[in-house]
Amino acid sequence: MSEWSPEDRVLLAQVEDAATGVPYIETGRSPYYAEFRRMVERLARVAERGNDLRVYRDGLLSVGVRGGRCRVAGACHEVASVAGMAVVGHGLTRVWVDASGEVRVSVDAFPEDRSAHLRLAEVFAEEGAVVSITDLRGETQLQSVDASVLGLTATVAELDRVVAGVDAGVTSSALGVLCGGPMSVADAYHGHAGYQSDEDAEVSFTVRNASSGSAAGVMLSLSLPAWLSEPTRLRVRREGGWLEQEVGGTGYALVGGVPLALVLPGVLTGSVVDRLVGVVPCDGTVAGVVLSVGRHLQTSEVLDGLEVSLRVNGRLLTDTPARLRVSDGVSNLCTDAGDGEAALMFEDSVCAVSRGELVTATITRTASGVVSQEAEDVAVLVLMRSGRVI
C-alpha cells in the first residue's frame, strides 16, 4: 500500500515546511526556475548531513564515498570524499571507516570489533558490474547498545560469573573474548575498556561479590609489568571492611586518618606540660595538630596567648607550635580554620609512630599583660595517617 500524502488543498496552502524550512513554490510565482532552484538549494542543505559517508557507484566496478564527519573509537574524524575505489567483479565488497578515520574496502567480513569501525555499505557486483549498494549507515546510527556492539560474545551468565568471582564454569575462551582475544589483558583493556565521563555528578565503578562463601572476596590488581616486578593489589578485608594494599608480598592496612584528642573543659589559668593525649592505635605518621578554644585568653598585650607542641614518647614532633594570640579573637577559634598560626610538623621520618606509643601535648599559656579574660574549653586534636604493616 502506498504512503498517503496531504490533500491538494492543504499542500496548495503551504508556504514553508515548518520542520525543515523548505519553501513551497507559490502558484504562479515568477520566475519559476529561480524559485525552483531556491527550493532545491534548501533541500540540499537539509539533506547535507544525511549525505555524510554515503557510498555511491562512480564506475562499472568502482564506488565512491561522500565526505563527512563521524566519531569512531572515541575520536572525531573529518573524512574526506573518496572516489574510484575498486570492488570485486562478482560477489560482495564491504565498505567501512576504521578507527583512524580512513575509508576501507574488502571482500572479507567486516572487522569483529564494532566499537572500532563504522559500517557504511555492502556493494554487490555480478558479471563485472555493480548491481546494488546496500546502505548500512542506518544500522550504524540506529542501534541499541548490547554486548555484540562491543564485540563481546561471552554469555550473560559467563560475564556474571566473572564479576561474581566464581571460577566454576568460566572458560578460558570466554575470558579471552572478554579481554579482547589473543591480545594481552593489559592491551585488551586499554583498547576495549577505556571509559571517559563528562558528567556533572559523581562517577563510580562498582565490583560486587554477592557470595556468602568463606573464601568470597573482592580484589583489584594494578600491574605495570614493564616497570614493576609485582602488581599492587587492593583487597577488601571481611573483618572490618577496610582496605588492604599488598606490595611485594607485604600488606598494609589503609584505614584513613586516625584522630586523637585532648579536651580541657573549664577555665585554663596556667600552662599544661606533657599532658597525655592518647595511645597510638596503629603504625603511621602524625600529620598535624590543631588548637581550638571556646573562649580565648584576653590581656593588654596582643602577643600573649596559647600555643601547643606535640611529643611521642618524649620525641618532639612540632617544628613550630600551633598558636593563638590575643589579637586573633575572643571566642570560638581554631588554627585549622585559619585562626592564628598552624603547626609546622617535622618531616615524616621524624613523625613516624608505632602502635602503643604515647602522645603528649604541652599547652603554653603566655600572659605578660593585664588579664581581662581567661581561656576556657581548650582542645587539642592530633591527626594521624595510618600505614600499619599487617
Image (cartoon, rainbow, N blue to C red):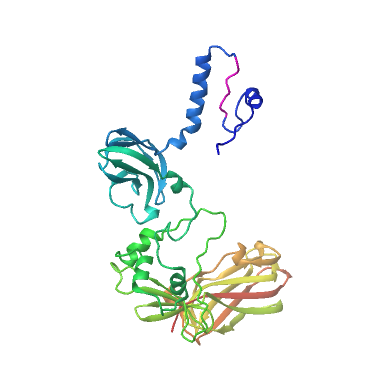
Residue at 66% from the left image edge and 24% from the top image edge:
9
Residue at 65% from the left image edge and 23% from the top image edge:
13
Residue at 44% from the left image edge and 61% from the top image edge:
147
Is 95 inside the magenta-drawn segment?
A: no
Q: Quadrant of residue 169?
A: bottom left
Q: Quadrant of residue 181?
A: bottom left
Report x, y in % for residue 70.
42, 43
The residue segment tinted magenta is 21-27
Report x, y in % for residue 304.
64, 67
Residue at 32% from the left image edge and 36% from the top image edge:
64
Between 287 and 192, the one lying in front of the other is 192
Between 216 and 162, the one lying in front of the other is 162
Task: Look at the picture and state if 70 lies above or below 228.
Answer: above
Report x, y in % for residue 34.
50, 15
Task: Look at the picture and state if 260 lies above or below 369.
Answer: below
Q: Quadrant of residue 65?
A: top left
Task: Look at the picture and state if 389 lies above or below 147.
Answer: below
